[in-house]
Amino acid sequence: MAITSRRAARPVSATVRATRARKGFTLVSMIVAIVLLTVGILALGNANTNTIKHQTMAQNRTNAVAIARAYLEEVRSRDAWALESEPAVQVGPDGMQITGGVYSRRMEVSEVRNNLLLVELTVDFPRAGQPVRLTTYQYRGSGLAGAP
C-alpha cells in the first residue's frame, strides 16, 4: 500500500515563478558592470599618469634650485670686481657644464650703485612653466687687496 499525499497544489503567482526562473545575471547588468569597471580602471590610470608627471616636474624644479644655489655660492666666493654676466650654458642635473644638458644656466650682473652689484641667476629646466630665478647682491668693497 503506497502512501500518497492528498494535499492540494497551491497556485504559484507569476512573480514567484519569474524569480525562480532568474538564477543568473542578465546581459544588460553584465554590460553595466563592465562599463563601470572600465571607467574606474581608466580613472586610476589617469591619476597614476598625472602623479608621475607632477613628480617629474617637482624633481626637475628641485634639481634646478640645487643647481642655482650651488652656482650662486660659487659666484659669491669670487672677487666682486671680476664678476660679469655669463651667457646661457647647458648643465646636467649635478650642475656641471656638459654639451646637451637638460638644464640651462645663465647669470646677469648689473651695477645697482657704485660698489653694489645685482646678480641674478636663472636656471631653465625641462617642461618648466617658469624658470628658477635666484637673486643676490654683491658688495664690491674698496677693491684694494690687503687694505684694512
Image (cartoon, rainbow, N blue to C red):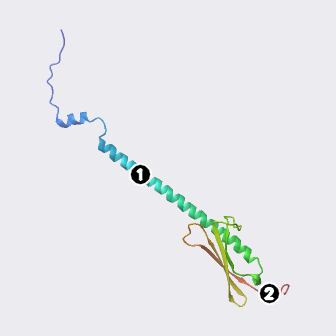
Q: Which residue is mark 1?
A: 40
Q: Which residue is mark 2?
A: 143
Q: Is residue 59 left or right of residue 32?
A: right
Please name the residue shown 50% across and 59% down the image.
50
How far from the left and from the top, in percent, is residue 55? Answer: 56, 60
Residue 40 sits above or below residue 69 on the image: above
- For residue 113, which quarter of the picture? bottom right
How would you rate the neighbour count of disc 1 (Cα within 10 Å): few for under 14, some for 14-19, many for 20 or more? Answer: few
Q: Is residue 54 left or right of residue 84?
A: left
What is the three-letter code of the residue carrying label 2?
Answer: Gly
Identify the element where label 1 is drawn. helix
How far from the left and from the top, in percent, is residue 41? Answer: 43, 50
Q: CA distance from mark 1 to mark 2?
A: 68 Å
Residue 67 sits above or below residue 138 on the image: above
> In terms of depth relative to the viewer, which is nearer, 68 or 5?
68
Residue 14 sits above or below residue 105 on the image: above
What is the three-letter code of the residue carrying label 1?
Answer: Gly
Image quarter in which the C terminus is found: bottom right
How far from the left and from the top, in percent, is residue 30? Answer: 33, 43
Image quarter in which the N terminus is found: top left
Please name the residue shown 70% across and 72% down the image.
71
Most extreme residue toward the top, as rendered?
1
Q: How many marks?
A: 2
Please name the residue shown 29% across and 44% down the image.
28
